[in-house]
Amino acid sequence: MSIVELPLDQKNIIITRSKDKISDIKKIFTNKGAQIFDFPAIYVGYPDDLNPLDDALCEINDFHWIIFSSSNGIKFVDERLRNLNSSLKECSNKIKIAVVGEKTSLTLSDLGIEADFVPPEFVAESLIENFPISGYGLRVFLPRVQTGGRNLIADEFRNSGARVVEVAAYETRCPDSIPLETINAIVNRRVDAMVFSSGKTVLNSAFLLEKEFGKEWLTFLDKAKLLTIGPQTSKTCKKIFGRVDSQAVKYTFEGLLDAAIDIFN
């Protein structure tokens, strides 16, 4: 019988993500032998005020394009449309949809919708540089996070002559505490790596770590490798943690897995 090699065998890795979404990334790491410690650093809900979103959705068929930069945007727009006796799939017959990112595209596919445009790289800059038509005269709908997101797409489309309606479709908030099992792993210096999939997970993780461990919180992770999903997350991580040990080449969870395997082998 051949022995299956597990490149992350005996590696203890903390995954920071929303509690309801840790499982999908957790599985691909455990399949490679890693021991995972959950660190829910975000929970997602509707924005404080739903009126701007509802107003935009009542006029959704008047837009030429909807641009989604996250799976959460798709989820909450579709959910809200259903409350208004419609759906994103129904609207997709009349308007075009662009997405930033492979995971976002897959979320759209789960609703039975094929994206009209996915940029070659999973960042906002790539969408802007490779968008299939000029923005001039377009009416563009940008559902986004309430706080903390980038304005790059909206700004660039406005500069090109598009009429942009940018509204909060959801908000990401910080949980109250870190799971006890994860706290124990950190205290006992058993963490080999910590994985971040967004700038918000970096910020919220730092907040929760300082809340739990005090001003010296950074010293508890001085031996752990810090892995990030892309350039914006890396920028935040360097600012807050002072370093990034590896950034995913492909800006996906599979890319994060590859980064972890590379750094430990």
Image (tube, rainbow, N blue to C red):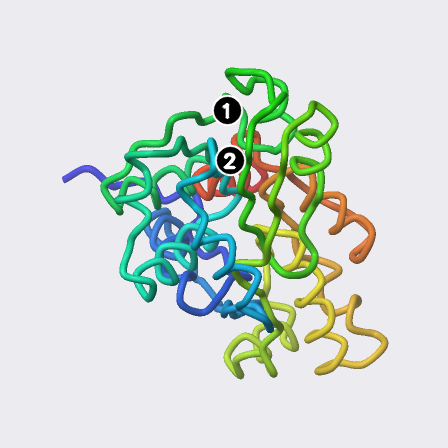
Q: Position of residue 75 (x, y in %)?
A: 39, 56
Residue closest to the far left? 1
Q: What residue would you read off at disc 2?
A: 100
Judge from the rendering whether residue 8 lies leftward or rightward of residue 263; answer left or right: left
Q: Are marks 1 and 2 in contact (CB under 8 Å)?
A: yes
Using the image as rendered, state which of residue 33 and residue 86 is in the foreground: 86
Using the image as rendered, state which of residue 228 and residue 42 is in the foreground: 42
Judge from the rendering whether residue 203 lies leftward or rightward of residue 163; answer left or right: right
At a point 58% along the width and 77% down the height, the residue shown is 175
Using the image as rendered, state which of residue 162 and residue 250 is in the foreground: 162
At a point 45% along the width and 27% down the height, the residue shown is 118
Chain-order first, disc 1 or disc 2: 2
Query: Under tag 2, what secondary structure?
Result: loop
Residue 111 to residue 121: above or below: below
Q: Position of residue 92 (x, y in %)?
A: 32, 38
Q: Which mark is residue 88?
A: none
Residue 264 to residue 119: above or below: below
Looking at the figure, which quarter contains the N terminus?
top left
Judge from the rendering whether residue 121 lies leftward or rightward of residue 209; answer left or right: left
Query: Under tag 1, what secondary structure?
Result: loop
Q: Position of residue 97 (x, y in %)?
A: 42, 34
At a point 63% along the width and 35% down the height, the residue shown is 163
Q: What residue would you read off at disc 1?
A: 119
Using the image as rendered, state which of residue 161 and residue 6 is in the foreground: 161
